[in-house]
Amino acid sequence: MVNKVCMKISVIIILFLFIPLTTITAEDNKILNIGVLTGNELIGNFNQPASLFFNEEKGRLYVADTGNNRLVSFDSDLNYLAESNADGRLEFPTGLVSDSKGRFFVVEGLKRKVLLIDMKAKSIKEIDFSGVSRGKGIYPDMLAIDSKDNLYVIDKANSRILVFDATLRYKKKITVKGITGFADIKVDKKGNIYTLDTLKGVVYIFNKKGEIIHKFGRRGEGKGEFYFPTSIAVDQKGLIYVVDQHKDKILVFNRKGEFQFDFSQKGWKEGKFRYPSYIFIDRSNRIYVVDRGNNRIQVFKEVSSKQ
């Protein structure tokens, strides 16, 4: 009797171990859910995470855990490493990037400022906006960093992008007439800048000079249309991924802005979203999504069935 029970238990364990990861099929593409981060027993659960960044040089994933006023780091295998609140100075961190020197740039959403956190130098200071025209006041939001360590800051108050060089000297601003508000920003390996207008549902692509080279998208509930897009990312093949928070989906387009496929739907199980808010894609084409309504980070990998 005991042997039969043990045999049944062994079979159950084997079946459990070989349950496949969540797979989302989208036409000729398969999006595999390869990991979920919610925090752990040691540090507690995430509380309304806002953004994240994967530092390629260090192989580290950093999460802005907004409600807990901290940054949390993981290795490339998604193992927890450490947390930091910058000696108690972090309050409501939202935007987050890290440069090739390992310096962190963090937006404090409530105080409307950007902090430069240098772990090696053990220093924390504010980014100087004194050389920037104030307009309606500066309201920093999301950030991006390019291969030359130029820093890009979304200024929501004035619907513009502010650009600083690697020494944090102010270089220029990028504006678009008629835009209702930039939301999120990414820079590809060629230096092209991607951003979007949440309210109008339009994606903008700029060249290095800040000139519009393409735009696409519109509001709607049909396939390939945006309802409330909040974040954008570009993979190594040039595919453009857009988070639609109210559709609980990721919409994918080619370089021309032609709709390719979408994936996921509303829910709490792995692979599903509740109000996703942010996306980041690393050089290995791993897709990191802030699943804010579920207080977690989900990680995906795209595998083409044509390969």
Image (spheres, rainbow, N blue to C red):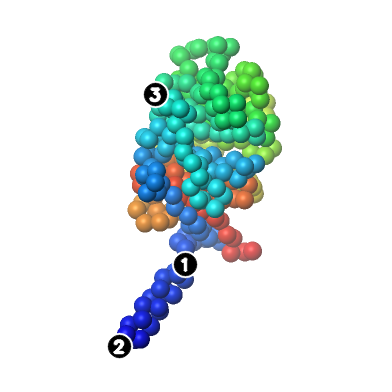
Task: Say which residue label 2 marks.
Answer: 1
Mark 2 residue element: loop
Q: Residues within 10 Å of mark 1 (few under 14, many from 20)?
A: few
Q: Quarter-wise, where is residue 226 in the image?
A: top left
Closer to us: 185 or 179: 185
Please tell me which of labels 3 and 1 falls first in the chain. 1
Measure how far apart labels 2 and 3 are at the Cα level.
Answer: 64 Å
Tell me which amino acid carries mark 3: Leu
Residue 20 — which label? 1
Mark 3 residue element: loop
Q: Quarter-wise, where is residue 221 in the image?
A: top left
Q: Are marks 3 and 1 in contact (CB under 8 Å)?
A: no
For the view shown, which residue lies furthest in the left direction? 1
Closer to us: 143 or 69: 69
Query: Residue 275: percent from the left, percent from the top?
Result: 37, 43
Tell me which amino acid carries mark 1: Pro
